Structure formats: C-alpha cells, structure tokens
Image (cartoon, rainbow, N blue to C red):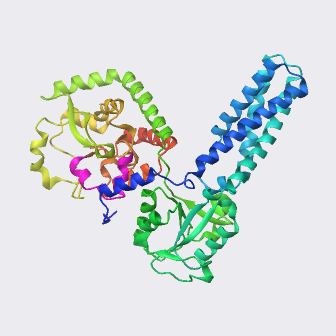
Amino acid sequence: MDSIAYNYQYEASKAALGRRARPSRASQRSVLLRRLLLTADVVSALLSAIVITLIFGLDSAHGAILAAVLMSGSVLSAFVFGLYSDRDLLTWASGLADAPRMVIAAFLLSWTALAVLALLNVDNYVLVAAIATVLGAALDGLGRAMARGWAHRVAPLRQRTVIVGSGVVAERLIDRLASHAEFGLETIGLVDDEIHMVGDESGGAPQLGNLDQLGEVIELQQVDRVIIAFSRASHQELLDCIRICRDHGVAVDIVPRLFELIDTGQVRNQVGGLPLLSVGVKPLTRASRIAKRTLDLVLSISILIVLSPVLLAVAIAIKLDSRGPIFFRQVRAGRWNEKFKVYKFRSMYRDAEERKRLFDEANEAGDGVMFKIKRDPRITRVGGFIRRTSIDELPQLFNVVLGDMSLVGPRPLILKEADQASSDWQARRLDLRPGMTGLWQVSGRSDIPFQEMIRFDYQYVSGWSVARDVEILLATIPAVLSGRGAY
C-alpha cells in the first residue's frame, strides 16, 4: 500500500489520545447497560431463590446456598455466553437476539442447581431446581427488558450521530434513525464534500462541514457516533475518515454497498432493516490491559521454564560457532514511543553493523526504510538456523516478563523505522506494547512491505481483544514452522 500523506504528527496523536480519555456519557452508555444487565441477573436470581424457599419451605441455610448458586451461576453463564456484550446497536436496542443464549445458559444452570440441591438432600430437588431455573429465567428476561427500557428514556444516553455522505441512502438512514428511537441515535447533521438532497428531503439535517473538517466537527459537536452512508469521496478519503473517528474514540458504522442484497439476520448491526457494519474503536480499558498483561506473564514464564534447555543449548552453540556475545541488544521504540532494549540471540558476526553499509545495494526491502537480505553474508551458521526457526526471538520473552513487550502486539521498530511511522493514524500502533508476534508475523513476516506492516499494526491495535491475541498466538505456530518470510 502506498504511503499516505497526513498533516498530523505524533504530538497531535497524543492529544487525540487525551481526548479519548474524557468520553461523553452517551459514548460510554454500554458500560451503564452492562451494569444494569448484571444487576438484573443478580436480582432476578435472588428473587427466584426467595420465592422457591418460601414455596417449598426450605430452611434458611439451604435457601442461602440456592441463592448463591443461582446468582453466581447466572452471572458466570451470562459472561460466558456473551450476554454482557456491548459491541453492537442491537444489544442496546433489544434483548430478543439474546433469547437463544439465555435459554441455553438457563438449561446449564439448572443442572448445576440440581447437583447442589441433590448434595443437600433437599426433598423434590429435581422439581425445585427446574422451577427455580425457569422462574429465574423469566424474571431475568423481564428485568433485562426493564433495564433497557429505562436506559432508552434517559436523554443524556442518546448518542449524537453524524452521517458522512448524502443522497438517497443518507435520507433513508436519517428516516430510520428518527423512527427507531430504541437505538438511541440522534442525527445532528451531515458531513460531505458534495452535499446533495439536503433539506426537507433529508430530514432537515444540516451540513456540518467537509470531509477534511470531520475531526473538527467531532470535537465541536461532541459527536459520539459516525455512520458512513455512500459518500462520493474516494476510497482513501473514507479510510482517512474512519481513522480520524477511531483516533477520537468515536464509534463508526458503514452502510455496505449493495445493502439491499444483504440479509439483516446475518449482520450484527441494523437499523430498521438497514444493515450496518461496525468498525469502531474498542476501548482499551484497565480490565483489558490487566487481562493482556496476565496472559503475557503466565505464558512467557511457562515457555521460559519449558524451553530453558533449548535456550541453554542455543547459547552454547552461538558461543562455539563465532566470537562475540550470546545476546544481541538493540534500542527499539516501545509503547508511547518510549525506548527500550530488545534481546535476541546473536545470529550475525559481531561486526555486522559496521559491515551493513557495504551491502546497501543488496537491500531487498525496496521500501526505503527496512533493510532485508535473504542470504545475508553477515549471518553465522548457527544464526541461519535460529533465524529460520525463529529461535533467535526467544530471549524477547525476558522483555515480555520485564514489561517492555507483549507476546502479541505491533512490531518493535528500530528508531529509524519508527521515525517513518509518526503520522497521526500510524501513531495509534503505540497504544499497546510491541509484540513478539502479531498480524505482520502471521501474514508474511519479512516479506511484508513496511507500510503494509504498519497497516497491520494499526488494525491490530484498533480491534484488540484477548480472543484475538489467542488467535494470533495459535496462527504463529504454523507460520514459524513453515519458515515463510524468516531470513
């Protein structure tokens, strides 16, 4: 992908990151919804236990145990089945899509209650467990509906929405948003370079600015969500719009082309039958950072213990093969552009850096930034093997333990490379610690051009999740075994 010129630099990006730290109440309404749903689950389980205790005459101890089982089981099963998900508009608008998962969760909870009641020797424990579960599920459904109904009536939770684009699709979208108040989206205007069909035909939505003014519009109008609806702008201009929205922490939805042919039952988001693809930023919350760090520590320490004999054998082989230190240390750009020293097994002769300029013409990277030669004469015999097998990367596990790196993350760039990735959207890659592996690693490693690699890093940071990390870690295994792009 060709490099895109942007006016914003890294300091501007840091300012944008600061703005994301002060979100509006409406942009954070999903947090409130999760709390309301959690409260509904706990209260409904408690009420169910109380009713069952009174009807069947359970003693207070057995009633307390049943209440504890139902409350903890309801919350745990709801979490496992994604009933606290906040990634789509449908979750906010209605709980109907949750019904099948709620039924399965209730069925599994009934078996847990059955086992506990059987251990307590409760009379008619099968009937007690069945009624308790059914009653709890019914109360839970009612409680969740009441929670959503209350949230829908709170005016500050309505998201201020801007439509990027104009014309027939934008007109239809504005009409759907106005007629479906349960989605809690308030259209405040349009942003486009070529506004057409504005005024009475588009619900009276005013033009707030041009595409290059989107960032200013988001700040001045305190926008919570942007929906892109068939603008005549170029592909690159729309990509820029999405990046601006993400850098401001604004939710982004796109009306897909040929949406008339898309079954709304197959998409996560839709408003009045109009399908939407959500590509907004996922907040890097304190809990998510703790989860990622915990995963890093547990796995990295375990791998170091299991592979310690391999590390020792490689260290001995490097020392016997050529003169020089066992480890190669190099300053890299880390999270928030902070410098740190990365550790790798030395795979080149100790004068490799001094000889690098002699091979400038042999550089195969071709992007003017990175330096890559498939058959680099500076690589030692042992170095060639540990590079092909990626064993040379294993000492970076110490960087992970120290907190300089993560198992999965953006590529740790050398300072010269980092200077070439300082524009606003590229700086988003610095939100997370650099990783031993990442999308760039499983997609081709050294065969990936610099700008494409930066794009992979941006996509990873923008869509980070623990599940995504696990997926990339599993994909790294066949990538390493194949040796593709390792040189």
Task: Please state the horizontal and vertical placement of residue 267, each as a whole percent of the image.
Answer: 62, 58
Which residue: 40% across, 48% down? 439
Task: Specify the quadrant of the image occupied by residue 278.
Answer: bottom right
Task: Please state the horizontal and vertical placement of residue 83, each as a whole percent of the image.
Answer: 66, 44
Residue 357 shows up from this direction: yes
Q: Nearer the viewer, residue 314 or 275?
A: 275
Which part of the image, by quadrant, shows the C terminus? Answer: top left
Which part of the image, by quadrant, shows the N terminus? Answer: bottom left
Which residue: 49% across, 53% down? 23
Q: Which residues are magenta?
A: 414-431
Vertical side of 361 occupied by 327: above or below: above
Q: Main secondary structure of the magenta part?
A: helix
Residue 82 shows up from this direction: no
Left-right relation of 377 to 34: left
Q: Nearer the viewer, residue 19 or 299?
A: 19
Q: Nearer the viewer, residue 444 or 150?
A: 150
Vertical side of 456 occupied by 235: above or below: below
Vertical side of 307 occupied by 81: above or below: below
Task: Please state the horizontal and vertical placement of residue 455, each as a whole percent of the image.
Answer: 37, 56
Left-right relation of 419 to 88: left
Q: Nearer the viewer, residue 369 or 323?
A: 369
Left-right relation of 51 to 274: right
Which residue: 85% across, 26% down? 53
Task: Please state the horizontal and vertical placement of residue 262, each as a whole percent of the image.
Answer: 63, 66
Residue 428 counted in the magenta span = yes
Residue 477 counted in the magenta span = no
Task: Specify the quadrant of the image occupied by residue 116.
Answer: top right
- Give the number of callouts: 0
